[in-house]
Amino acid sequence: MSNKILQLGYEYRDSGTYQFNVTSEEDVFFRKYLARRIGDVLPLLEDHNPDAFPVDISMDDVEGDVMAGISAVIFQDVLVIDMLWVQEKLRHEGIGRRLVQMAEDVARKRGSIRARVRTTNIVPFFVDLGYSITGTVQDVPKNVVSLFETGAIRRSVYWLTKEF
């Protein structure tokens, strides 16, 4: 499936030059790739309305390898962020922040007034971006919130929202 590219741009960082690709067609292979890279995501990603507008953004290196990415949809006036991943060696360089901001920019241009995310582990990151915790479920067994791991370790699931 070819993706309709909404935006293409290069950004130089100390660790190299990267190209951001913003697409508006759902790419199941990109979503599966992100899920594998994250390795600890909610197994039942939200079942989005068929009218939802996909927003997938990848940050690729000069060889075309995905180094970071975000997968989200816009439905009605809400941006729903499903997955966010940044390669470990590139973390803490502002790339995740940049990806979220880019997705929010696309959402605002399409008339969205809020964003929301469901996560188990990066709550402080989203709080720093202006998101507020709007719900939580405590003590969820890890095998319920992970695609790839089993075990009795328990986690909390958080819902966060941001008004634009």
Image: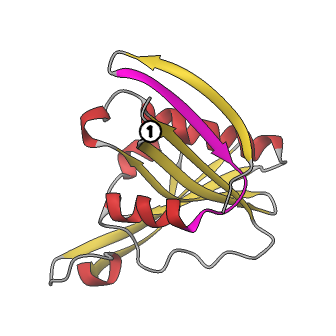
Q: Position of residue 3 (x, y in %)?
A: 69, 53
Q: Position of residue 8 (x, y in %)?
A: 66, 32
Main structural element of the magenta stretch: helix, strand or loop? strand
Q: In the drawing, does residue 53 fall left or right of residue 80?
A: right
Give the number of marks: 1
- Quarter holding the C terminus is top right
Query: What's the residue type where badge 1 is placed?
Result: Gly
Q: Residue at x 29, y 65 (%)?
A: 39
In the displayed image of the protein, which residue is found farthest to the right? 111
Q: Is residue 129 visible?
A: no
Q: Position of residue 62 (x, y in %)?
A: 44, 29
Does residue 22 show up magenta in the picture?
A: yes
**Of the pair 65 and 127, the residue shown nearer to us:** 65
Q: Circle 1: is it few (<14), some (14-19), or many (20+) Cα within 10 Å?
A: many
**Of the pair 34 and 160, the residue shown nearer to us:** 34
Does residue 127 show up magenta in the picture?
A: no
Q: Residue at x 26, y 72 (%)?
A: 155
Residue that label 1 marks: 96
**Of the pair 142 and 159, the residue shown nearer to us:** 142
Q: Residue at x 58, y 45 (%)?
A: 57
Which region of the structure is painted magenta? Answer: 16-28
Q: Is residue 70 visible?
A: yes
Q: Position of residue 18 (x, y in %)?
A: 47, 27
